[in-house]
Amino acid sequence: MMEFSEELLSNRIFDLSEMNFDFTPRKRKAEGCSFDPDVDKSYVLQPNGDYILKFYAPDAKEIKVVPWFGDPTPEGYAPWRDTPLHAVKDEEGVHTVVLPFDERKTGPRNLDIFVDGTFVVWPYLPVFWSGGKVWNYVEVPDNDMKFSYIYDVPHGTVAHEYYYSGETKRYERCLVYTPPGYEKGTQSYPVLYLQHGGTENETVWVSCGRVNFIMDNLLAKGECVPFIIVMNNGMIRYEALEAPNYVDECFENSLIHYCIPFIESKYRVKADKWNRAIAGLSMGSMQTNDIGFKHPDIFGNMGSFTSTMYHTDFFTTYERPWPRVMANPEQFMKDYKVFFCSATPQEDHIPLFNKDAEIMREAGIEGKMPGYRRVLHDGRFIRWDSWRMGLREFATMLFRD
């Protein structure tokens, strides 16, 4: 049974929302009601890790909350939805529900909220972009996730940048993390191009993955070298209505021909392949493998969280490069310095992760390439926990002499 210190429970990570950071009183309490959602927090983290969620909705008959990620199967897979929770309404019109702590379901948990059968985004709970739209969520504490929380260390900066892409014929946005001291310094930095999964966007590695805090904490301990991280929207397609069921070369061409030149013209970066890396999770892992393998002159380091060289669910408008690359393992080991893969049994694509491992073993790469590492995390960890852990370990390997 996990226990949480008062210091951990007071970490601001549990109040951090994509849209707001603090609650500010804006109006008086409803007449005759002791609970005011504008003053009293609608989500209260308990010492045992439970969350008490409160919804002031006197006219609503029923409020149902469906947390994301259910009980893992005997094989380890965790379904995307858990058992629904039904709120209890009191005489004042406040609906209360308890989200019980479960050590197998920590990190960010999306909340499907239904008011009288209608899906809503509740304005008094944290929100982020996930799964194709804005969602409510709570960050469930985990002592093993402390490396992704907020501490009194030097913090880097996350900037929103806009660049024109000739592939989409419009301005695209990317988020750029620069390490502490970048603004006042003169040195140049390596760059990691980091991709999200299917149906998500360029914000999620910050709001869900806490990548900026992970990097701040690693750098404060001297556990990685400083580098810049660029996060793009990998959902762009030539035929947008077909996304995300297939992958074409739109994002690849936008990244190679427009984003990278933009970054290298505006930021102080080391512009050679050994100082560039590409990584991603799930769909972003597939894009990582395809783009990295097609451009060994541009990327010398690759990372896959839920590794997917081999994939049966997506189809592409181009010939996937991994069979050709794996057919020449000696050249592969010359082209890439770091090749990192990680997953957890709870993820959707664990059979593909295992297939990738088999491909690498058959190619003779395992045990021969110093920068090759494959990690299967403990099955206790939910998807974003695993992806955070993978990013942390990958970061410690990158850009070393």
Image (spheres, helix red, strand yellow):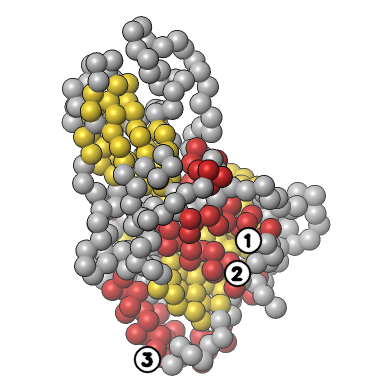
Which residue is labeled 2 in the image? Answer: 396
The reply to whether residue 166 is visible in this rendering is no
Q: Mark 2 packing: few (<14 Cα in 10 Å), some, or many (20+)?
A: some
Q: Is residue 265 left or right of residue 325?
A: right
Residue designated by label 1:
218
Dot 1: what SS?
helix
| Residues at marks 3 and 2, CA–CA distance in whole angstroms | 27 Å
Q: Nearer the viewer, mark 3 or mark 2?
A: 2
Residue situated in front as seen by the camera: 288 or 209:
209
* Residue 306 image position (x, y, % from top left): 39, 67
Q: Is residue 63 visible?
A: yes
> In the image, what residue occupies the spot 41% across and 54% down?
2
Question: Vertically, is 252 above or below 374?
Answer: above
Q: Position of residue 75 (x, y in %)?
A: 23, 70
Tell me whether circle 2 and circle 1 mark residues in contact (CB < 8 Å). yes
Name the kind of residue labelled 2 in the image.
Thr
